[in-house]
Amino acid sequence: MNKLVITIVLALGAALAAAQSTTDKAKDAASSAADQTGKAASQAATDTKNAASDAAGAVKKGAETGYEKTKEGVNSAVQGTEKAVTGSSDQNSGQSGQNAEQGQAGTPSSAGQNQTGAASGEESATAKEHLPQTASPLPLLGLLGIGSVAFGMWRSRFFRR
């Protein structure tokens, strides 16, 4: 009987040792996995931060470039509008500005008319014939659509059967 008790105690001790060994291995594996996950998360956060910084730099550069292009376009449009309104070329626009300072607003000097000759008259005539086509029927169609929907809702609300 002593042998039986000793065998049982030894078997239980071996089972506990095996269980403890398995538990230690599981803890080590979990710790290793947690470390790897932490490193991966840290790397992902760094990569995301770098990507966001790069994107912000690209957006800033694009905005600055867009600002400059818009500024150039506005200046060009202003000059084109001045040419279309006054019907004069670059040479005449400087002279009409000088004439305006002298009290002759809008009347170009005879020297300016002689320099451009008939070309100035032709430019202003073509500018009057070919006005920019900025109007569109889309706002009217949108208004008609909204009106139709509103009328349909009103009719369905007050004339239910």
Image (cartoon, helix red, strand yellow):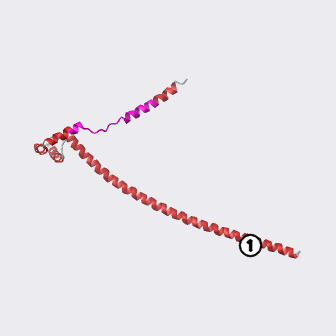
Query: Residue drawn 22% across and 37% down?
Result: 128
**151 w.r.t. 115: above or below:** above
109 magenta-colored: no
Q: Residue most toward the right?
A: 1
Q: In the rendered view, does 69 fall on the left or right side of 27?
A: left
Q: Could you say where residue 125 lies in the image, as x and y percent from the top left? A: 19, 38
SS at mark 1 in the image: helix
Query: Residue drawn 48% across and 62% down?
Result: 47
Q: In the rendered view, does 70 fall on the left or right side of 117?
A: right
Quadrant housing the N terminus: bottom right
Magenta span: 126-149
**Most foreground residue, 79 or 104:** 79
128 magenta-colored: yes
What residue is shown with label 1?
17
Q: Main secondary structure of the magenta part?
A: helix
**48 w.r.t. 2: above or below:** above
Three-letter amino acid code of the residue under disc 1? Ala
**Most foreground residue, 138 or 150:** 138
Query: Residue drawn 80% across and 72% down?
Result: 11
Q: In the rendered view, does 36 fall on the left or right side of 92?
A: right
